[in-house]
Every structure is written in structure tokens, then in C-alpha cells.
Amino acid sequence: MDPLHLGMGWTEEELEMPQILIESTYGQSHPGSAHLDCLAHAAEKGVAENGGKAARYYVTDICDGMAQGHDGMNYSLASRDMIANMIEIHANANAFDAGVFLATCDKSVPAILMGIGRVNMPAIVVTGGVMDAGPGLLTLEQIGAYSAMFQRGEISKEQFAYYKKHACPSCGACSFMGTACSMQIMAESLGLMLPGSALMPAAGEELAAAAQAAGKRAVELAREGVAARQIVTEKSFENAIMVHAAISGSTNCLIHIPAVAHEFGIDLDADTFDRMHRNAHYLLNIRPAGRWPAQFFSYAGGVPRIMEEIKSMLHLDAMTVTGKTVGENLQELRDSGFYERRGRSLKKWNLKREDIISPFDNPLGRHGTVAILKGNLAPQGAVVKHSAVPKEMFHAVLKARPFNCEEDALNAVLHHGIKPGDAVIIRYEGPKGSGMPEMFYTTEAISSDAELGSKIALITDGRFSGASKGPAIGHVSPEAQAGGPIALVEEGDLIEVDIPGRLLRIVGVKGVLKTPAEIDDILARRKKEWHPKPERYPTGVLHFYAQHAASPMKGGYME
């Protein structure tokens, strides 16, 4: 008998039931988490209905949007690993038989996936869905562009205030295919969610019902003794990557998915994304790459519909948390009228499923959406979302304009210090440099500038928001703080970007082309004179993270 549980009001009978951890990132921290306790209570109800006893635990996440514009953004990626650490502590410090894990957003969803892989217990995921779009289908990712337009004097203060006031009308993930929405889709694609439950409207009754059903299923998983690593295999990750290509998912997934795979004991790097994206079909007409807000994804059939379209490229025999394979789940949904029920919401907008999710044989693109570039500027690789890059920038030789922090680069862009033909280099923003913050405002300032949007590139060892678009190349590795070549770039160096050729390299100095051997000699001389910047955070969490962070190309996890 456990007197400590009895002290919380448990009964003796409940002590004998399967004990289910309900872990959420609930907190009044942002719209993605503020409603999660309601879903946790729904999951708890489902656990009780199936003869289990639930215990609710919490580890609140932070919001990348609220962290924008100040040093709070530097804590964002590190927070992922800290949440995973707390899940490990909560799960292993108590004798739970299974877990229901709830999260919504950019770092919380990969964090719970990492935690699940690490503790390897029977587990099921519930995500917090997506918020509605605002008036005129306004969505939050447009605010960055409106901010740049306001600073340039292109819209009034009153117009900008209206956009800010109406961009987030409800709880849930921001309604565009940013990192939050992408990672919800990844969680379902890995087989850890009930089919069709990713990106449900956050304000709808259907999401609470899904949470309740997940609670019921958690009890069954406990009784069956099916742990997460028995479900999630290498095949599961390959399925997720193919879905990522089909949805034009966030580049941040190339940090998160390898980190999740690492916790599941699977070696997966960014090169795998490049290989699998090369012949993948891109199907999704959702912002920021497409036209419609993310709530329409669920209306069109969600992850199952994407999988139906690309099933020739999937492992249909991959197991899922339902106890059935991917193929069996899809067949069951077809037979149940799932797609017809979901499609009723599209009819209200006079839209068809094909307006949101293109057929496999008529895709929006046939070469995936991301590429890994390598060369003397990025020996370990760099990431570009080529589906969002103007065709004019698929191959270009540009003049380097290096900056040692994002703030200086953004100021130069906004005040016309950057000209067509420039390569804006932002460095010392990698995991070891500053925690690897997003370069959101700089990318939006560039892509919203008619003169610059198709005529320059942004190259950084930092990362981008999932909402970012335009000629942006990130995750340059090794990073500057680790002595990578990006630290050695000087004003006027010539930078070649070749997306089809997967190249990112320095090809000239002071505007003059040089041979590869000459460039190697120049970089060797510069390296001898280079010294790392003083550590930005000598104490605290970011000091610890900087000391232990792996390369972004491996997942940026703590080693």
C-alpha cells in the first residue's frame, strides 16, 4: 500500500489499477499551451473509463513568438532538451505503466518525442491542434512582414496594430505550416498518435474527444506492455521524412527529427532528409509556402490524406500506437467515411480537397522541399528550404556581408545597407555561440523587400522560423563559435550558392574569383589568426547547453 498516493486522495482500489502518467506542457505561457490542461483532464477521463488511474504532471514550455526580438530566443532550443530531461525525471522517478503526452508547439512536441524515446515506456501523444485564422484569413506568420513594412513606413501604425490584434484569435498552434504544425504532423507520422488527430482545430470538440480516446488507449498499451521503441523504428522515421517533404515542413524538423531518432537509438542525420527529398512529391497548399491557413489541413483529411497520396513511397507495414500498421489504419479510415466527414468543412469555403492537398500525380513539386548544401563554407552541411527560394537564387555568386549577430544584420537590411547581389552572413548564432536562435525578423525583412527578396541570400549558423520564406540558408556547420569556416568569411568574399548542385562555398576574395587551392590557402591563413569569441553565457542553462550541444546537422541535442 502506498500511503503517499493515499494522501492525495487515491483509493486502495486505484492503487491496483494501471497507473498512467499524463504529462503536458500546460501553462499560461502562450496560446499553444494555455488549453492543454483541458485536454489533460479529457485524457484523464479516458484513463478512468478504461480502468486506469491517471496522474497529471506539468513542464511548461516557452513561446518562440514571445521570445522574438530579445535574448529570450536564445533559450528556445535549449528548452527542448530541458523538457525532455524533466519527462525522464517524472517518468523514471515513479512507477508508471504508460504515459499520455500532450504538447502543441515548436520545442514542446519534439521534447515529448525525445522524452518518450529516452524512457521507452508505453506512450501515446496528443497534440493541441491549430488555432483558427483571423479576419481575412490573417495568420501570425504575416506579422513579421507587416512589422518590416511598418518600420519602412509602408503601412500605418493603425494598420499594424489591427493585424497584431487579430492574428491569434484562439488557442492552438499558429495557423501556418511552421515548426509547431510540422512537428504535430511528424508525431502522427511516426505512429505515436491516433490517426487523423494532428492539427485538429484547437477550439473544436473533436480534439477533446481524441484526448479522451488517447487516455483509453494508454491503458490498453499498459496492459499490452507495448513500449514506444517497439512501435517507432527506422521505417517510422523514413515515413515521417516523406510526409515532411509532402507538406513542405519546417527546416527546424531537420534539427528535431534527428534528435528524436537519437533518443530512440536510431542514427539519422540531415543527409537522410536530402536523399529522401530528392524525388519526393510536394503536395500541400498551406502557408507560408502555399495559400491557405493550416486549419484547412485537417479539413482536407490531415496526415492520413497525405499518406494516402504518397503511400507508394511509404512503409505501410510500419506499426502504430493503435496496434495496427499504417496501411491498416488507412484502410480503416477509408471504410469509415473519415474523409467525407472531414471534407464538410471545406465545402463551407467552396473548396475541394485537391485545393489543399494536391494528388500525387499532379504535385506542386517533384523534388521535395529541402536540400543539404556542402562545400568549403559548410563542410558538415547547411539547410535550405528550396521550395521557398526564388528560382533566380538557385545558382548565384554573391558578395559576402558578414555580421557577428542578427541585430546588426537586421539593422543593415532595414536601413538599406544591403544591396542586390549581397550575401548576408549572420554568424556566432549556432548552439555553442548563442543557443541557436531563429533569424525570423531578418528573413521577413528580406523576403518582404521587393528589391532584395529575389536578389540576395541570408546564410547563417543559426536557424529560421518555420514561417520563414525566401533565400535563407541555415544550420551552417561547423558553426562560427566552433571555428567553422563561416567564422573566417570577410567582407567582399565571393560566395557561390548552387542548390541543384548542393554546393555552398567561398569562391573568391575581394570580388575576385580564386581557384579552390587558393581559397584553401587563404582560409588556412585566416584560421591561424582566428580566435573564438568570449563565451556569451559563462553561467546557467545556456552555458551548460553550449558546452554539450551537438552539431545542428546531428540534431543540436546535448551530448
Image (cartoon, helix red, strand yellow):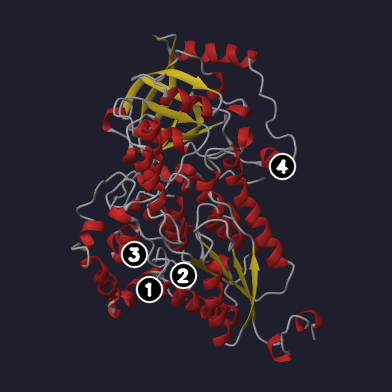
Q: Amino acid at mark 1?
A: Asn
Assess disc 2: are there few (<14), some (14-19) or many (≥20) residues with their C-alpha within 10 Å of its C-alpha: many
Quarter of the image for the N terminus: give it: bottom right
Asked if one can make out residue 371 in the rendered structure from this viewpoint, the answer is no
Query: Residue 513's x, y, as percent?
Result: 39, 10
| Residues at marks 2 and 1 touching, judged by CB atoms closer than 8 Å | yes
Q: Position of residue 315 (x, y in %)?
A: 39, 62
User: Given this view, does label 3 or label 2 mark the residue nearer the observer?
Assistant: 3
State yes or no: discs 2 and 4 in contact (Cβ < 8 Å): no
Residue 150, percent from left and from top? 38, 34
Choose the circle earlier in sequence order: 2 or 4. Answer: 2
Which of the two residues, 441 or 88, is positioned nearer the viewer here? 441
Q: Quadrant of residue 220?
A: bottom right
SS of the residue at dot 2? loop
Asked if residue 486 is positioned above or below residue 475 in the image, the reply reads above
How crowded pointer 3 is (Cα within 10 Å; few <14, some 14-19, many 20+) is rated as: many
Which residue corresponds to the image point at 40% horizontal and 37% vertical from the top-left?
A: 147
Foreground tag (2 vs 4): 4
- Answer few, some or many: residues within 10 Å of disc 4's Cα (few below 14, many 20 plus, some between 14 and 19): some
Task: Report the label total.
Answer: 4
Circle on res. 320: 2
Q: Which mark is residue 544?
A: 4
Label 4 element class: helix
Task: Name which of mark 4 and mark 3 comes first in the sequence.
Answer: 3
- Give the Cα distance between marks 4 and 1: 43 Å
Residue that label 3 marks: 298
